Image (cartoon, rainbow, N blue to C red):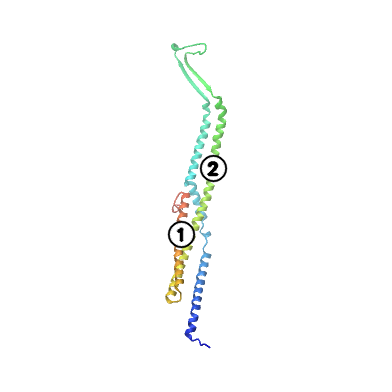
Amino acid sequence: MHIVNNKTRSSLLEPRLKMIVLVFSFLIFSSSFSKLLAQESMIPELSNSFLSQLIDTAKKYYPLVKINQKRIDISYINFQKSKMAWFDVFSLTLNYSPNGNTTTSLNQPTLSGFQIGLFINFGSILQKPYLIKVAKEEVELAYLNKQEILLTTEAEVKARYIKFVQSSVLLRMQSKIAIEAESVVKDARYKFEKGEANFETFTKALIYESDNRKLVIDAEANLLIAKASLETIVGKKLSEIH
């Protein structure tokens, strides 16, 4: 029968205590992380009034909307021009033949003095109503195209605004996780220096902190890209919109 002294019993219990401490620390971190995720939501960050301002600004300053308005103006000018072109079917000529230079013949009789001639192009008369109708249809088509562009622009502004808010919330959440990771590293370093955690555990904590710092940088980049994309379609800086 072997007798186990206190030193031997302590050496047997030490690995179990380390395991209990690590598991307990992991549970605390998991609990705080779960609360962090539960508290974060992008829905409260959305502002309908600000979104309306973004949409109104985009409808005024987005280059595609301006281009379409120019096409409407041009089509309307062409329509007005086609209506005024009724006078093109008539042509008026004025000839003057002095008395002394008048030459007459049976085939080409010529009168002396001033001669006025009026010519009518019947082909143009028949085509004119259709040309006017085509010009009018082009105006209506331009207006319909404008409605489509406005609807598409509004939908795109909403999508980019949601993406911008999402990126902002993800950055804030990832920053909080990075702070938690720093606490994990501090705790792991403290335990490692006291001999309560091995080098592998401390290394994993360092890698975890480094990965979270990279995720913060990625989240910052995504936020900047989302902001630039939203400002592109709005046509102004977000700071200039009130």
| Front-lying residue, 159 or 117 | 159
| Corner quadrant of residue 224 | bottom left
| Front-lying residue, 230 or 3 | 3
Q: Is residue 16 placed above or below 134 in the rendered structure? A: below
Disc 1 element: helix
Locate residue 135, reporting x and y percent.
Answer: 54, 35
Q: Is residue 183 placed above or below 160 in the rendered structure? A: below
Q: Which residue is mark 1?
A: 218
The kind of residue on which mark 2 rests is Asn
Disc 2 element: helix
Crowd tier of the residue under label 2, counting other residues whose Cα lies within 10 Å: few below 14, some 14–19, many 20 or above? some
The kind of residue on which mark 1 rests is Asp
Q: Which residue is mark 2?
A: 145
Q: Is residue 4 placed above or below 238 in the rendered structure? A: below
From where the camera sits, is residue 183 visible? no
Earlier in the chain: of badge 1 and badge 2, it is 2
Locate residue 142, reporting x and y percent.
Answer: 53, 40
For the point 56% across and 37% down, the residue is 137
Crowd tier of the residue under label 1, counting other residues whose Cα lies within 10 Å: few below 14, some 14–19, many 20 or above? few
Q: Is residue 195 placed above or below 69 in the rendered structure? A: below
For the point 44% across and 69% down, the residue is 203
From where the camera sits, is residue 19 visible? yes
For the point 49% across and 37% down, the residue is 74
Q: Compute the Cα span from label 1 to label 2.
A: 39 Å
Locate residue 140, reporting x and y percent.
Answer: 55, 39
Q: Residue furthest front?
A: 1
Locate residue 212, reporting x and y percent.
Answer: 46, 64
Position of 82 with respect to 213 (left or right) is right
Q: Nearer the viewer, mark 1 or mark 2?
A: 1
Give the label on residue 15, or none: none
Q: How many marks?
A: 2
| Front-lying residue, 2 or 73 | 2
